[in-house]
Image (cartoon, rainbow, N blue to C red):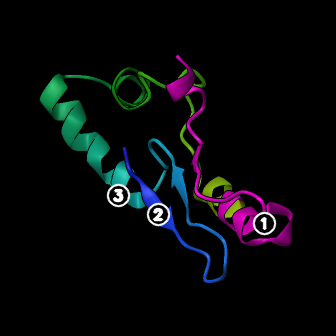
Amino acid sequence: MSESFWYRPCSRSPNRRRPPYVWTPLVERQIPDTMKARGMTEEQVKHDVLLAAQPTKEFVTVDELAALTLFLCSDAARQITGTTLQMDGGWTAQ
């Protein structure tokens, strides 16, 4: 799982965003090797390996992660400080 640490340069405490697999070219490039190593189809690798622990069975998109980051940068989020926000499709709620 990737983890990013974000700090807003002001008087607010840092916040942390913790997405699971974000659909990026890096993740996409890992699929063929995993298919070969495990004798699986692309859909099996996505569903049964990469998204196995994620209840929604969907990747977080770059746009979704960017939207959360923009929200955290906004005045609407000024009271959200020093916390970790899980954008994980229910992964940690299990």
Q: Residue furthest bottom?
A: 9
- The amino acid type, in three-letter code, at marker 2 is Phe
**25 horizontally vs 87: left or right:** left
Of 47 and 12, nearer the camera is 12
- The amino acid type, in three-letter code, at marker 3 is Leu
**Mark 1 element type:** loop
Q: CA distance from mark 1 to mark 3?
A: 33 Å
Q: Nearer the viewer, mark 1 or mark 2?
A: 1
Q: Name which of mark 1 and mark 2 comes first in the sequence.
A: 2
Quarter of the rendering containing residue 9: bottom right
* Magenta stretch bounds: 68-94
Of 80 and 88, nearer the camera is 80
**Mark 2 element type:** strand
CA neighbours of label 2 inside 10 A, class few (<14), some (14 to 19), many (20+): few
Q: Position of residue 66 (x, y in %)?
A: 64, 63
Q: Is residue 29 above or below residue 12?
A: above
Q: Position of residue 38 (x, y in %)?
A: 17, 24
Q: CA distance from mark 1 to mark 2?
A: 17 Å
Q: Which residue is mark 2?
A: 5
Please tell me whether residue 31 belongs to the stretch shown in magenta: no
Q: Residue furthest top?
A: 94
Which label was assigned to residue 26? 3
Q: Which residue is mark 1?
A: 78
